[in-house]
Image (cartoon, coloured by chain):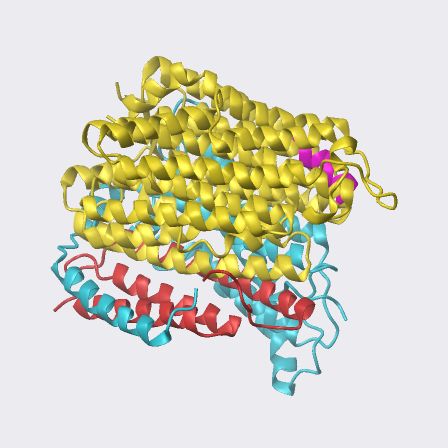
Chain colours: A yellow, B cyan, C red
Amino acid sequence: MSDAVSAPWLMAAPVVLPLAAGLISVVLPRGRAELAVGVGALILIASSALLQTVTASGTQFMAVGGWTPPLGIGWRLDFIAALFLTVTALICLVVALFARGYLRRALPAVDERFWPPFLLLWAALAALYLSADLFNLYVALELLTLAAVMLVTLEGNGAALTGAMRYLLVALAGSAAYLLGVAFLYQGAGTLDLAQAAAGGAVPALAVALMTAGLMAKGALFPLHGWLPPAHAAAPAPGSALLSGLVVKGAFYVLLRLWFEAEPIAGTTRQILGLLGVLAIGWGALLALRQARLKLVVAYSTVAQLGYLLLIFPLAEGAWRTAALSGGLYLALSHSMAKGAMFLSAGLVLYAAGHDRIAELRGLASRAPMTLFAFALAGVTLMGLPPSGGFIAKWQLLTAALGGGQWPWAVVLLAGSLLTAGYTFRAVASTFGSAPAQRDFRTPPRSLEWLALGLALAALGIGFLAADWLPRLEAAFR
Amino acid sequence: MIVSERLLALLMLLFVAFAVSVLLDLPAPGLAAAVRGRLAESGVTSEVTAVLLNFRALDTLLEAVVLVAAAVGALLLAPVGPHLGGGPAPAPLLGWLGPRLLPLAAVLAIYLWWAGSARPGGAFQAGAVLAGAVLLRALAHHRAVRPDRLAVGLLLVAGPLAFLTVAVAAAAGGAPLLRYPAGWAGTLIVALEGGVALSVGAALALLAAGGRSAR
Amino acid sequence: MNGAIYGVVGIVLFAIGLYALFVRPHVLHKLIAGNVAVSGVFLVLLRSGHGAPDPVSQAMVLTGIVVAVAITGFAAALLVRMARVTGRATLGRSSGP
């Protein structure tokens, strides 16, 4: 089942390609967007090939530099990593295509500065998915944070700079906590490889607690979520799609690996995490209902949806462990695509109306129906309606909740969907009706609308693949 | 979230007590034995350099990229591009010392880079010395120095790109990423460290210059 | 006794740094506090090895220092820009930490 990887260059491609492209884009005076799209297509092909490899041959390992852990750094390609690589590649490619058209039209000053951080962010994510070494993960997380903050600063206005600074400071605190946890773990287990440390059984609980706190800060998990809405709303739309869709999931991915490979802490802590998830769902959704600006609605929605991910912890008990985990991961992937589509649509709304104040969008639906449809479709996934990936994911989680006798969580899952429906409908409904005479909307470019719609459809489509993918996800956790 | 400062201080105090008690119980064996065992194959004689540039070279590659990314980020913030110096007239000592320090610093940097294989030293230390000297010289000048954007960009990315090329070259032949070909480890390490040193120097200098707009 | 002093001081610095990062309003103070916290972590890392130096810990600390410098440098540039654009060097109110 576990194998030394047969094609190391292929396994390294999702990291090497965006890294090289990102560095090159710094010195490229023109054509950065084209470089990103071209390289992006290659990365998608490579990631899909890796998915095929893992499906056929099982988990693969690579000892980077030829040195096996604990001396060296180990990379591990299992189904989860391959799936995340592929979905990330898809989202990033769509965002790249979108940004190429959108930035040139809507934010020309931002255009050439978007691409280096975008590519470096992609490389950091890929390194994060593959790495099994806790210190290597630290450096990857730092690169991810840096690139993400750079995306927030792009528009250069006061809100962007303040939002970026707050994000950076919270991330700095999180890094310190995470690294201290790594120090404790290294001194307890004598290795930096997560699997080895877990096998040795000497992982200090405090190490995991520290790392968890750090990762929660970077992943905007309640109560360390306050930095997210201002930062994600201030970034340009394609940047926001990446930030809400992928960057916060990266931190969560590491958190999941940490907890479910290291099996560290007892039930009560998991229940506490679940409780924080409930608070996130409620708080995020209620605030989303009250926002005056569309991008802030979408950003608070992210806070709420991340709360669902925290529910995995209490639900992953005993026989329901793999169901809850696979459901949670499916939720993360569906949300990434749906939230990406939502932010892209919000960007188009901004383009069409010149602003994103919900109160003044009446009549937009008749001018940009496809944009609003993409937005609504993304909302369908977030609400968990069939046949979307969100539905499959929530179904898994509900099964785990009811099967394990933990029905209060099931109530939360269902109530959350209602709240999600609430703020989605509020946003979409505000665009119906006929526009007052003095209001003039621009028509968004059709190609960009197709891209946003495509991403929303992908989030739905992932539901159809569940029959094949869910069992594989469950197997990966056994 | 408004957290009472006293409550936070109390929590920190409790944390310190708890953490110290946990820490002192940890065995902390370290990996010195493992490193010493394979040191001969690493191509260098300094254990720390062996870890940084061979056993865990991926960390060093990513770290160089982080530094370059930070410099690029600072560059992106400044609306008119980087400029060094151009402050008020420098103190006489600085004005005299600044230009003369640069060649001395270059020699020191080269030594640090070269010595890194056997003693404490290496790319980052050399780069830091270079950056310091460049900044001192810039501060010694009354007029701002506006480096050519392309040249600076190339300097920044050359080191990490070279590192990446070596990393991939090994993998293309079927070996894992970043595996140095037999016998070449020592030479490659020194060469890569040189490239990284230049990038680090440029990045650090730019970080000190970034964020400012020409007035 | 070997290494214990590093560990204790490191944890204390971490706590002080983290506290100041949250409590102090001026962004530059927060940045410096963050650096203090991270320096504390480095000290804890250096404790490894039963008194004999551990090359992996040292490598981690060297890497960590560079990463911290990079982030601090970028943050400082961001602060200068932010102060210029908003006229303030504090973060102001928000709905969370």
Q: Residue at x 55, y 68 (%)?
A: C91
- Residue A453 position in % (x across, y down): 64, 26
Q: Considering only vertical position in the picture, is A287 above or below B179? A: below
Q: Where is residue A220 drawn, in percent x and y? A: 44, 50
Of A346 and A468, which appears nearest the observer? A346
Q: Report the front residue among A311 and A413.
A: A413
* Residue in front for this viewpoint, B154 or A143: A143
The magenta-colored residue range is: A97-106
* Along the viewing direction, whichever of C59 and B121 lies nearer the viewer: C59
Please indicate whether residue A446 sits to the left or right of residue A293 in the image: right
The image shows residue C87, relative to residue A64, as above or below, that is below
Picture coordinates of residue A301, whole percent (x, y):
52, 43
Q: Is residue A124 magenta?
A: no
User: Which quarter of the image is occupied by the C terminus of chain A?
Assistant: top left
Q: Main secondary structure of the magenta part?
A: helix
* Residue C61 occupies quadrant: bottom left
